[in-house]
Amino acid sequence: MNIDKKLNPICLTVKLSIGHLMGSKKFSETRKFYCATKEAAEKELTAIQSIGFVISNSIVDKSIKVEKEKTEAAKVSKLIREDLKSNFPTIKFNVHSSTFSMGNLINIYWTDGPTSKTIEYLLAKYLMGYFDEMTDSYVHSNFRSDIPQVKYLTFKRSMSDLVTRQLMKSIKTENNNIEVNFETMSQLIRTKFSETNFNPEINKKIVLDIDDYFEKL
């Protein structure tokens, strides 16, 4: 039967012992009842208790939405998305956050656009420090109390086919069209790509210097 939860927002959840006083898993059953008011739910619970053994129960008002407090990683993710959209409006970024027992992490993915160093430069304020392998401990070298921060940021930049072709053409021109093998060309393309910022609004390719990059946007 379909129940209108707007008219019946109070959810009564009852775990019953079926045929066994100990209420073992094999003989227990959970049921849900929707009532219009809390008083009606309490009356329903009293009636159920009079005819059976109730292991546990809860009465929840489904009309009240409780917002969960955002984690630090989620707060940083929101700020990072805003910064990236403001500085690189034509580039699509994917920002994913995760929290674990000893800290938190944000992964950032995008295609072409700014270099990883440029993004790292822009978002450095959100990183509270670094992991020191020599001491096997985390060093809080960049802690700030005025903004949320995370322990780790990772950057994954991909290269489109269009930019790959552009770089290949540029490399051939710079080397007077001298033929090189596939492995060498691939390495040259990857190296040049890692050092070059691309922006669709400025003929794809723009200057390497970070300060000049921001001035031209």
Image: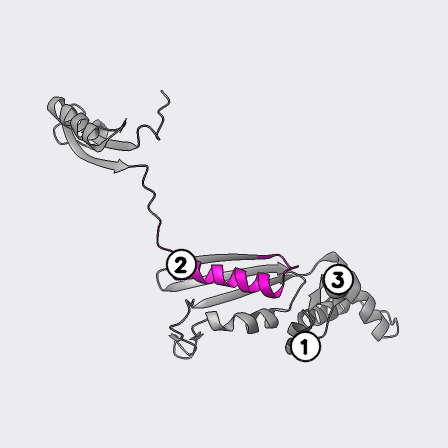
Say what secondary structure mark 1 lies in. Answer: helix
The residue beneath circle 1 is: 212
Asked if residue 213 lies left or right of residue 107, the reply is right
Magenta-colored stretch includes residue 83: yes
Magenta-colored stretch includes residue 98: no
- In this rendering, the answer to whether 159 lies above or below 177 is above
**Where does the C terminus fall, quadrant-wise?**
bottom right
Q: CA distance from mark 3 to mark 2?
A: 35 Å
- Image location of residue 183, percent across then percent down: 74, 66
Q: Which residues are magenta?
A: 68-93
Q: CA distance from mark 3 to mark 1?
A: 23 Å
Residue 20 lies in quadrant:
top left
The residue beneath circle 2 is: 99
Residue 10 lies in quadrant:
top left
Q: Amino acid at mark 2?
A: Thr
Q: How many marks?
A: 3
Question: 14 or 36, which is in the foreground?
Answer: 36
- In this rendering, the answer to whether 139 lies above or below 111 is below
The residue beneath circle 3 is: 164
